[in-house]
Image (spheres, rainbow, N blue to C red):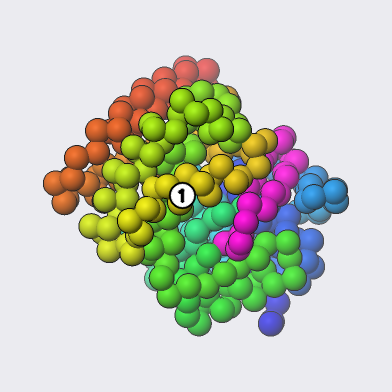
């Protein structure tokens, strides 16, 4: 395909890995939009370690319209990057939203003008070891999944030949809810226990996790997802197959004292449940607990700023 200009907004674990993979391919002009200048990234993938040169912008005023934007911030930070999107997006721009949760287009469209929005489900584990050091772990299957169609084909072509594999599906809503099901237990439990994925092998957590999942499955079905009768058990078994040493985004944010993405995860389940009059007490409990931690983290950050 023709060379494209790609802006990656947000250099956390997901965005840092995406920027490194695209820059390593050498097939496109890659611009990282971040809070601080980074001239190069150390990128770990399996046994390989590379040093990747990177063009970084730290002020939206320096940005111009690009062909593609990969939006890799946390869902709750979408509004804060509106100045970046205003400068990067034109009528022909496509914005791939690599965020957790659901409702990607509704969340991003108000800030992206006339640009097209492509929601993406992120399956790969991107760990930010330092501000300029990223590690990619594959989980299973595709690394990213997007709704099938011509725009999806172009997006997959952007990443062809990189370590990130892009899948396309006509059943995107169902897969989106299945990823949300993973997140409504993986993120809260690792954050609250401050342990990585291996914590789920504790037998005393199984009933709690299955209860959270069964509530969310009922909501997902009401929202149109085609979920199986044993979906909760399947999702939990999938999670048990993840690398024990992998961490979740909320786990890392909790350790770093950052605000948490809870509204886009269990919060999305609780919000959708209200529309259908479905009781979700366990998801509501996770939401309340993690919101209290998130609010305290945000207050501490504002006092130290």
Q: Secondary structure at mark 1?
A: helix
Q: Residue at x 55, y 24 (%)?
A: 194
Instruction: Name the quadrant of the N terminus.
Output: bottom right
Quarter occupied by residue 62: bottom right
Q: Is residue 130 magenta?
A: yes
The residue lying toward the viewer, choosing from 86 and 298, is 298
Q: Residue at x 33, y 37 (%)?
A: 211
Residue 21 seen in this snapshot: yes
Image coordinates of residue 145 in percent, x first then y, are: 53, 65
Task: Give the residue at mark 1.
Answer: 235
In screen coordinates, is 290 left or right of 127?
Answer: left
- Disc 1 residue crowd, few under 14, some 14–19, many 20+, Cα 10 Å: some
Image coordinates of residue 60 in percent, x first then y, are: 55, 52
Q: Is residue 53 above or below residue 225?
A: above
Residue 75 seen in this snapshot: no
Q: Is residue 92 magenta?
A: no
Q: Which contiguous range is marked in magenta?
A: 125-144
Q: Residue at x 53, y 49 (%)?
A: 238
In screen coordinates, is 23 left or right of 305?
Answer: right
Main SS type for the magenta part? strand
The residue lying toward the viewer, choosing from 125 and 56, is 125
The residue lying toward the viewer, choosing from 206 and 183, is 206
Taking the view exactly as shown, the residue that stands out farthest to the left is 277
Image coordinates of residue 304 in percent, x first then y, are: 52, 18
In screen coordinates, is 213 left or right of 47?
Answer: left
Image coordinates of residue 225 in percent, x first then y, are: 32, 62
């Amino acid at each position: 395909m023709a060379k494209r200009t790609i802006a990656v907004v947000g250099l956390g674990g997901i965005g840092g890995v995406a920027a490194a993979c695209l820059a390593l391919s050498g097939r496109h002009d890659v611009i990282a939009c971040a809070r601080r200048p980074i001239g190069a990234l150390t990128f770990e993938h399996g046994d390989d370690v590379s040093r990747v040169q990177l063009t970084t912008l730290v002020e939206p005023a320096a940005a111009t319209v690009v062909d593609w934007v990969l939006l890799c911030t946390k869902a709750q930070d979408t509004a804060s990057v509106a100045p970046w999107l205003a400068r990067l997006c034109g009528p022909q721009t496509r914005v791939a939203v690599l965020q957790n949760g659901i409702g990607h287009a509704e969340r991003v469209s108000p800030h992206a003008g006339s640009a097209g929005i492509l929601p993406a489900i992120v399956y790969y584990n991107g760990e930010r070891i330092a501000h300029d050091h990223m590690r990619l772990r594959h989980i299973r299957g595709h690394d990213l999944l997007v709704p099938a169609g011509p725009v999806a084909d172009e997006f997959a072509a952007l990443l062809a030949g990189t370590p990130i594999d892009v899948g396309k599906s006509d059943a995107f809503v169902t897969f989106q809810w299945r990823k949300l099901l993973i997140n409504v237990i993986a993120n809260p439990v690792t954050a609250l226990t401050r342990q990585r994925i291996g914590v789920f092998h504790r037998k005393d957590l199984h009933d709690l996790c299955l209860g959270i999942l069964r509530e969310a499955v009922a909501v997902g079905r009401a929202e149109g997802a085609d979920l199986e009768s044993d979906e909760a058990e399947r999702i939990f078994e999938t999670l048990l197959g993840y690398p024990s040493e992998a961490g979740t985004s909320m786990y890392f944010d909790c350790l770093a004292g950052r605000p948490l993405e809870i509204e886009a995860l269990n919060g999305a389940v609780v919000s959708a449940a209200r529309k259908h009059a479905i009781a979700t007490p366990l998801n509501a409990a996770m939401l309340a607990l993690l919101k209290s931690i998130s609010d305290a983290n945000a207050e501490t950050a504002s006092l130290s700023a």
